[in-house]
Structures are given as structure tokens and as C-alpha cells.
Image (cartoon, coloured by chain):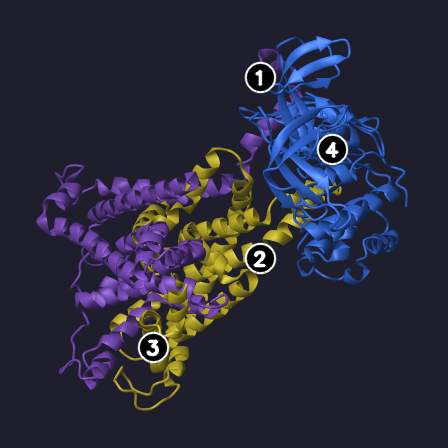
């Protein structure tokens, strides 16, 4: 006992070292992101260190360079479609799996989450050739369907978790109070899982917006997503316009993430991060 | 239950029982159908592709023969595993203390740190590699600061080297490890550690004999996730390694972009698939093991 | 506010298995309208399954459920006109307190003009009028429980089902809620079935207690009856502390059976059919019904022994007595009357434990 108490009064070197280590880790984590934000407002024509003058010219360049904005628009279109399709087929699946006592349920869950465990580049190659074989090839439909394969698991997982947490009690109460199956679903089940659907949907959109390994294989005049255009720009040009568009994308993503946090708390998503 | 009991089961009751088991999973049908058509069939199609060779007299397994006999490709496969292994070890060593700190020493919910941990996951991979390109450049900030501190006397050429690839990989993967370990550490009762201290164990011994064994499952699940993600990544190798670290995914990318040998790319994809399936199997075994305990 | 809908409940030969596990052996139970019945037993005894079968949330493998003069065996829960309070209350998290209470009335297509006054009357009854616009999460456990009760009674159900309603409350709150619940139930007159594993709760609330174990009904009767005359070892042990004294039948005479717990001790009990010389029986005596004295008492069953331990319990002293010639210690509660008046008996002192013949039950 006295040993523990005296420990507390002396400066704790172990804890100090740990604090410094953790601080260093977060610097490591944030530095490459912050430096890009910094360069997005620099005036230099290429990434020269240290930064001399500040300007917003790279944001102007971002707006002037058509492919950035068109691909951003297309990325959103893909993300929204993929999330919507995933919700449409994923929510019924999540509801069934969360309450099922069938021995098959576990296997079905594993199957529906399996796309998360596949190397994206393999999915990209396989889907491209598959769609070409089907006659869809490099098409907007192809991109949307491919992204849905990856979005679906996020919806299933988030909604199933929220629904399982909610417990059966409320639905049973509603039934005993006289609600029929449709009334139970509309007035009790749906309101309870709404936050899960929204959070899962936004998360699926974020994943889709950032997807490069699949989108890359579907690159074409009207199927370029933002990350594909960014990759091409980064490999061919050296100016910090890429920093401006990156920063813009990050701001959008963080805003969406804050919405998720508001809705369900981040723990929810993190807790199940595979 | 005797035979007679079985017969007296009311028809409605048995019917409703049967309804429950089959009908229970009806809702999953659209999703299952979708994944069969757009996930399973493409992978099967890919396997057929992998059996096609460019050479006119080529045999069905030529692509695989080439992969597993040519020392260059064999090396690439082994390197892929090695890079993933090393990244996993780095993530454990770096991630564990962070997870420990977040669970044991952060007061309140730690929402800010969690946000800082997750926010990078939301930024595009292009942004992150671009950031490292700037930071690690020969005359970039890192060299500058290290020289100012007197730690090195001439600029470092880290970019386009394996070191920069590991920087990029650990940067992307470490948060997954921290999250996995933290979520298990959270369930370890602090009083177990206190009991150990009261019984006279030092803090190091308490960590080694109590905390670490109780959080192994977090390390293992985190490792599988990191290993799996690392096996599939190629953008970091492409953008930060510049050919200094060639792994399977990067080779697939090159086959696709430069050589356009689709059969061979498909075969390499299947090797990646096999690795992914092994990881998935291990993951399921561990999850199930936990359920049984 | 008397409930004119209150109905009787009848379970006829109802059974249920889950896979290999028999949750409920064929069971019969008749509950007259207006009665408050508790299903009491340890977890896994089948009491919750019984309640859920009455509610229609589980269907029985076999048998029939009647509510009033209606066979509801194959009627879905929403058609049974019941009220139910769940263990964790199951309040709708997205609805306010008054919306929760109004839910059942809305489902019953009650005219809007009638719903509002009915809801406010229900909330008055449970003293929550000022919380009507709060969300359930903003209420304490006790308040949530009262909302659940108001919600379940708002529709004047045929039967009120209570699934461990007090389990989530702390001890003090539980006692005051018990009085309130009983009072409300009596004023409504609604037939009530409560599932509980807490014997005190069952004893203080119910008109009748049904003790269950391993999917079977062991005993059914008024609280006093079950407490004083348990039908078997399990019931006796489950309802409060009990001393179970294993004896051998030494002799059966005209004035009763002579039993010996060991050594030279002789106890007498009224003979009952099926008792034979040499058989082993168990004598059950409640600790508070045993008295202690330093000298051998005149008549009635008595055991000499030694005080092993003593615990002061406020209203009483608890002694553990080791009887001579027997391995099992017996527990005795003695009133601590008159402040310093009754000094505790010393550990190690020799005493006689004795009781009235009416206080014992032969199992």
C-alpha cells in the first residue's frame, strides 16, 4: 500500500515516456495530413520547403480544372447509389440475421461480410472482366454495382448491431399493446434502427468516395471517380492543386463523419471495425 | 419426448415452428443473391481467366507454373508475405502502447483521441501518400528538422525507398491495430492489475503476467486485419516505393497497365485470394473460439 | 377505475420444449378473474416460458390457453388484449412518456379525444404527470417502471403480465414499488400474472403463489399456506431459510411417529400414510419458529445442542446450533426484545432448541 501511494507522488517516469510516445504517434498520424493542408494554401508552383507565401490559387486551379469537379460529382453519384442499393437489400438481411436462431445465420453473416476481407485489387480485376463479359464493361452501372459489393457489408454490420442492441422487448411490447406486424415495423422497429441505417449509409458512402483500387479498373471518360483523377494528376503534374482537392475531400469526409458521430457515437463504428 | 407426444403436436404449432426456421432468413435472400451474382461469379470467372495463357500451345496451369517456378515471381510472393509480416509487427509494437494509454490513462470518453485516430482513415490514400512524399523529400521538412537537431549531417533520401513504404503502410494500418487492441483492453478489469500490484508484482511484471495475456486476443485479431489489408495494398508501394518494393498487388497492377497479360494477372489475383481466405478462416476460428470461452 | 374486462386465465396441458431441453412439462393452471398470481422459481424453471406463452410471444408445443371464454392458443399477441411490463421495461426510446402510454390506445383505434384524458389519468395514477413530455432515457429506473405500468394498464387489458418487474430496482425502491403496484392492481382489479425469483416479492404481493422448478409446478397455494406447509424439500428451501432435519422413523405408535435424527434424541410427529419403520424422512422447521432455553423444556420436540456462532441481526439474534449426535447444524432466529433486556447467548453454551409441533412439516 505505501509503495503505491508514494509512487503517485514521485514524478512517474514510465507514464512520462508513455505520454511522449503517444504524442509522437499522433504527430506521426496527423503530420502527413496537416502538411498537405498547409501546402494547399501555399503560393509555390511545386512543393518547396519551407513554404514562402500563402495564397488560395490552388483552390482556384481546383475549380478551373474541370475533371476534378466532374469526377467529384460522379463520385457522389456512385456513393449515393451504392449506399441506397446496399440499404435496400442490406437492411432486410441485417434484420433477419440479428434475430435468427437458425444455424445457417452465422454462415450467411460471414458470407455477406466476406467482400471486406477480399483484396480490393482482385475484386477490381475480376469485376471488370466479368462486366465486360456481360456486356456492361466500363460503364457507370458497372462502377455502381462494384461499389455496392463493398458498401453492402457496412450496412449489414451496422444495422444488425444496432438492431441486436435494441433487444426484442420493444417490439414485443408493441405487439402486446395491439400493434400488428406492419405497425410494429413502421412505428417501433424502423425508428429504432434509423440511426444505424443512416450511420451505416454514410460510412458506406465514405468508403465508396475514397475507393481507388476498384474504381481504377473502371476508369473511362464518363466513369472517372475523384480518386482516379487525383491519381492521374499526381502522377503527371507536380503542382499543389492535388493538395487543395485532397483537403476539400477531407473536409467533406470529416463533416460526414461528424454526422455519424452525432447519430450513433463513433464507438459504434469502431467497435466493429472488423 | 415420446412418440405419442409427437403425434399430438397440434398442426398449427408444428407449422409455425417450421415457418420460424426457414422463414427466419428469407430477408437475407436479396443480399445473398446480389453477392452471388456480383461477387462469387466474378471470382469464379476470374479463375477461368487465370487458366488462359497467351502462348498458343499453353497448358491450363501454365500461369500458375510460371508463378511458382520462376524465382522472380516466387520472390515477389515471399516478399508480399514478408512486407505484411513486418508491417504487422511494427503496428503491434507501435499500436499497443497507444491503445494502452487510451484505455487506461485517458479520462472521460476519450472522444478527441478516437476522432484523431479515425479521421486519417477518412482521408484519401492519395492525400496521405502525397503528405509523405512532401515530408520525406530529400530537402523536405523531416530532413530539415533532423539536421537542425544535429541528428544527421546531410539530407536523407528516404523517398522511393522501402523505408518510405513502411512509413506509408504503418500510417494506414496502425489505427486498425490500436482499435482492435483497445477494444479488448477495455474489457480487462482494472482491478485485476491493482490486485497484482497489491500482491507485490512490479508494474512491469503486472503488465507481462496480467495485462498482456488478457489482451492477446486483441493483438491477434488486429494482426489478422492488418496482415490482410497489407496483403492487398498496392497504392503505397506504387506511390511511395517507386518500384523499390514489388509485391503481388503491385505486380497485378503492372500486368494490367503495362503488359496487359490478363490471364497472368488473374492467376496472381487468385494467389492473393487464397491468402485472403486463409486469413478469413483464421479470423472466424478465433471469433468462434472466443464465443465458446 | 375498476377494470370490467378482467378475465380468467386457463392453461390446459400446456408444454414447450426448446430442442432437447424441456422448458415446460404439461402444465395446468386456472387463474380466476382478478387474482394476482406469482410464478416463483429459480432461473430456468419455466416460469418465463409460461408467461410468454400466455402473452403469445411463444407458442406451446401442445395444450391450450384460454383467456376468459376465448381459446387464444393460436391468436397472435396483438389480438389478446393484454398488458405486459418487461424486466427492462421495453419503453419505446423514440417516443415521449405520454406517447408511450398512448401507444396501446392508438393501436386500439381509440378516438383522439379520449386518448389524451386517459393518458393523463394514467400518468396521475403513477405520479408522473409532470414528466409527460420527457423521453424515457431521461427518467430514473423507478420512474421508467411506473411508465411501463401505466402503459400496460392504459388499455384496460384482460390480463396484466409482469416479467420480473422489480428486478432492476434497488432494494428500498423495490419495497415502496411493491405497495404501489399492489394498490394499483387492486384498484383496477385486473387479473395479474407475475414472474419472479424473489420469494419476498411473491409472498408480499400475491393472492396465490405457484412454485416451479425444472419445468414443473411443485406447489400452488396462498402465500401463508406455502410458507407454513411446503410440500417438498425444494419449496421449503426456496421460500425463506429453513432447517431440514433428516430423521429415521424409529417407531409408529397411536399418538404419532417417533423419529430420531441421530443419537438418543427422540422427536414426535403426527403419523401420515405411507410412513414405515426405518424409513428416512425430513422434518422442516423455520428458524424463527424455534425457541432456545437453557433447561429441557416440558413437552414438544426439542434438541439439545451447543451454540456454535452468533450474529446480531438488529431485530433478532441468529444462532447456529450444533445438535448432539447430528451432523447438520440448525439455524435459530430469536427476537431481540427490549433493548439490553435479552443478552446474547454465549458461543459454546449448551442450549435446548425446541418448537411447537404445529411449526414443523414432515416432508
Q: Residues within 10 Å of mark 3 (few under 14, many from 20)?
A: many
Q: Chain of mark 4?
A: C
Q: Residues within 10 Å of mark 4 (few under 14, many from 20)?
A: some
* C76 vs C161, nearest the viewer: C161
Q: Chain of mark 1?
A: B
Q: Which secondary structure lies at badge 3?
A: helix
Q: Residues within 10 Å of mark 1 (few under 14, many from 20)?
A: few
The chain that appears purple in the image is B
The verdict on a common chain for dots 3 and 2 is yes
Dot 4 corresponds to which residue? C289
Q: Which numbered disc, 3 or 2, marks the residue that appears first in the sequence?
A: 3
Q: Chain of mark 3?
A: A
The chain that appears yellow in the image is A
Q: Which secondary structure lies at badge 4?
A: helix
x, y (%) of residue C80? 77, 35
Residue at x-position 54% and y-position 60%: A264
Dot 2 corresponds to which residue? A195
Q: From mark 2 to mark 1, how far is it between C-alphas?
A: 45 Å
Left-right relation of B183 to C75? left
The verdict on a common chain for dots 3 and 1 is no
Q: From mark 3 to mark 1, how far is it between C-alphas?
A: 71 Å
Dot 3 corresponds to which residue? A36
Residue at x-position 46% and y-position 53%: A154
| Label pair 1/4, CB-CB below 8 angstroms | no
Q: From mark 3 to mark 4, how far is it between C-alphas?
A: 84 Å
| Label pair 2/1, CB-CB below 8 angstroms | no
Which mark identifies residue A238? none
Chain C shade:
blue
Amino acid at each position: 500500500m505505501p509503495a503505491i501511494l508514494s509512487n503517485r507522488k514521485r514524478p512517474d517516469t514510465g507514464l512520462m515516456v508513455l505520454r511522449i510516445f503517444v504524442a509522437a504517434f499522433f504527430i506521426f498520424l496527423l503530420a502527413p495530413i496537416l502538411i498537405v493542408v498547409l501546402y494547399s494554401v501555399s503560393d509555390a508552383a511545386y512543393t518547396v520547403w519551407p513554404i514562402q507565401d500563402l495564397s488560395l490559387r490552388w483552390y482556384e486551379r481546383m475549380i478551373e480544372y474541370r475533371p476534378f469537379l466532374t469526377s467529384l460529382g460522379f463520385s457522389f453519384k456512385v456513393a449515393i447509389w451504392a449506399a441506397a442499393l446496399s440499404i435496400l437489400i442490406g437492411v432486410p438481411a441485417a434484420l433477419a440475421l440479428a434475430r435468427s436462431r437458425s444455424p445457417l445465420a452465422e454462415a450467411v453473416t460471414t458470407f455477406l461480410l466476406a467482400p471486406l476481407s477480399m483484396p480490393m485489387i482482385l475484386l477490381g480485376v475480376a469485376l471488370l472482366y466479368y462486366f465486360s463479359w456481360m456486356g456492361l464493361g466500363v460503364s457507370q452501372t458497372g462502377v455502381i454495382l462494384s461499389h455496392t459489393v463493398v458498401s453492402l457489408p457496412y450496412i449489414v454490420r451496422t444495422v444488425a448491431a444496432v438492431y441486436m442492441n435494441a433487444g426484442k422487448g420493444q417490439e414485443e411490447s408493441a405487439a402486446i399493446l395491439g400493434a400488428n406486424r406492419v405497425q410494429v415495423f413502421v412505428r417501433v422497429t424502423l425508428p429504432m434502427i434509423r440511426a444505424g441505417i443512416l450511420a451505416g449509409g454514410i460510412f458506406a458512402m465514405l468508403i465508396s468516395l475514397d475507393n481507388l483500387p476498384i474504381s481504377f479498373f473502371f476508369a473511362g471518360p464518363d466513369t472517372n471517380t475523384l480518386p482516379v483523377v487525383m491519381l492521374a494528376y499526381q502522377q503527371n503534374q507536380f503542382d499543389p492543386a492535388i493538395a487543395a482537392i485532397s483537403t476539400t475531400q477531407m473536409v467533406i469526409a470529416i463533416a460526414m463523419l461528424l454526422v455519424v458521430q452525432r447519430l450513433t457515437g463513433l464507438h459504434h463504428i469502431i467497435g466493429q471495425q472488423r | 419426448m415420446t412418440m405419442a407426444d409427437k403425434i399430438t403436436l397440434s398442426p398449427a404449432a408444428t407449422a409455425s415452428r417450421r415457418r420460424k426456421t426457414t422463414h427466419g432468413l428469407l430477408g437475407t435472400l436479396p443480399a445473398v443473391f446480389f453477392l452471388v451474382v456480383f461477387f462469387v461469379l466474378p471470382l469464379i470467372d476470374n479463375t477461368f481467366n487465370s487458366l488462359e495463357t497467351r502462348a498458343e500451345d499453353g497448358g491450363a496451369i501454365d500461369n500458375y507454373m510460371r508463378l511458382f517456378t520462376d524465382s522472380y515471381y516466387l520472390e515477389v510472393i515471399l516478399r508480399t508475405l514478408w512486407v505484411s509480416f513486418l508491417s504487422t509487427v511494427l503496428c503491434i509494437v507501435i499500436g499497443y502502447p497507444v491503445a494502452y494509454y487510451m484505455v487506461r490513462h485517458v479520462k472521460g470518453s476519450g472522444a478527441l483521441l478516437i476522432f484523431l485516430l479515425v479521421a486519417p482513415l477518412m482521408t484519401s490514400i492519395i492525400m496521405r501518400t502525397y503528405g509523405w512524399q512532401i515530408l520525406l523529400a530529400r530537402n523536405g521538412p523531416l530532413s530539415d528538422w533532423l539536421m537542425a537537431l544535429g541528428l544527421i549531417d546531410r539530407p536523407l533520401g528516404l523517398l522511393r525507398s522501402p523505408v518510405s513504404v513502411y512509413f506509408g503502410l504503418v500510417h494506414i494500418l496502425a489505427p486498425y491495430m490500436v482499435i482492435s487492441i483497445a477494444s479488448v483492453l477495455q474489457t480487462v478489469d482494472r482491478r485485476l492489475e491493482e490486485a497484482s500490484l497489491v500482491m507485490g508484482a512490479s508494474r512491469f511484471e503486472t503488465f507481462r503476467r496480467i495485462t498482456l495475456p488478457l489482451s492477446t486476443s486483441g493483438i491477434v485479431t488486429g494482426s489478422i486485419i492488418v496482415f490482410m489489408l497489407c496483403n492487398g495494398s498496392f497504392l503505397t508501394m506504387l506511390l511511395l516505393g517507386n518500384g523499390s518494393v514489388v509485391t503481388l498487388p503491385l505486380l497485378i497492377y503492372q500486368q494490367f497497365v503495362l503488359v496487359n497479360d490478363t490471364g497472368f494477372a488473374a492467376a496472381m489475383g487468385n494467389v492473393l485470394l487464397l491468402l485472403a481466405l486463409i486469413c478469413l478462416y483464421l479470423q472466424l476460428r478465433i471469433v468462434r473460439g472466443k464465443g465458446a470461452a | 377505475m375498476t377494470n370490467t374486462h378482467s378475465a380468467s386465465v386457463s392453461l390446459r396441458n400446456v408444454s414447450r420444449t426448446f430442442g432437447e431441453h424441456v422448458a415446460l412439462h404439461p402444465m395446468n393452471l386456472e387463474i380466476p378473474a382478478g387474482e394476482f398470481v406469482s410464478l416463483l422459481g429459480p432461473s430456468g424453471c419455466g416460469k418465463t416460458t409460461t408467461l410468454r406463452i400466455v402473452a403469445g410471444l411463444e407458442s406451446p408445443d401442445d395444450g391450450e390457453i384460454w383467456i376468459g371464454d376465448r381459446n387464444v392458443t393460436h391468436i397472435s399477441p396483438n389480438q389478446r388484449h393484454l398488458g405486459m411490463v418487461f424486466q427492462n421495461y421495453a419503453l419505446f426510446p423514440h417516443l415521449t412518456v405520454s406517447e408511450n402510454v398512448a401507444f396501446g390506445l392508438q393501436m386500439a383505434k381509440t378516438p383522439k379525444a379520449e386518448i389524451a384524458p386517459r393518458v393523463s389519468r394514467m400518468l396521475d395514477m403513477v405520479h408522473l404527470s409532470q414528466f409527460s413530455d420527457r423521453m424515457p432515457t431521461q427518467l430514473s429506473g423507478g420512474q421508467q417502471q411506473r411508465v411501463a405500468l401505466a402503459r400496460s394498464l392504459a388499455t384496460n387489458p384482460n390480463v396484466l403480465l409482469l416479467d420480473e418487474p422489480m428486478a432492476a430496482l434497488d432494494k428500498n425502491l423495490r419495497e415502496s414499488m411493491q405497495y404501489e403496484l399492489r394498490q394499483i392492481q387492486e384498484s383496477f382489479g385486473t387479473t395479474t400474472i407475475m414472474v419472479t425469483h424473489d420469494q419476498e416479492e411473491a409472498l408480499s404481493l400475491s393472492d396465490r403463489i405457484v412454485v416451479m422448478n425444472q419445468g414443473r409446478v411443485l406447489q400452488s397455494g396462498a402465500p401463508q399456506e406455502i410458507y407454513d406447509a411446503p410440500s417438498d424439500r425444494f419449496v421449503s428451501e426456496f421460500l425463506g431459510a429453513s432447517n431440514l432435519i433428516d430423521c429415521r422413523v424409529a417407531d409408529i405408535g397411536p399418538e404419532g411417529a417417533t423419529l430420531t435424527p441421530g443419537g438418543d434424541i427422540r422427536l414426535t410427529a403426527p403419523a401420515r400414510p405411507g410412513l414405515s419403520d426405518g424409513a428416512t424422512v425430513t422434518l422442516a422447521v423455520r428458524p424463527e419458529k424455534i425457541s432456545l432455553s437453557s433447561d429441557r423444556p416440558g413437552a414438544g420436540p426439542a434438541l439439545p445442542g451447543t451454540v456454535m456462532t452468533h450474529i446480531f441481526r438488529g431485530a433478532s439474534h441468529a444462532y447456529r446450533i450444533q445438535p448432539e449426535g447430528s451432523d447438520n447444524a440448525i439455524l435459530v432466529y430469536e427476537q431481540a426484545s427490549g433493548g439490553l433486556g435479552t443478552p446474547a447467548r454465549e458461543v459454546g453454551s449448551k442450549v435446548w432448541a425446541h418448537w411447537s409441533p404445529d411449526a414443523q412439516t414432515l416432508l
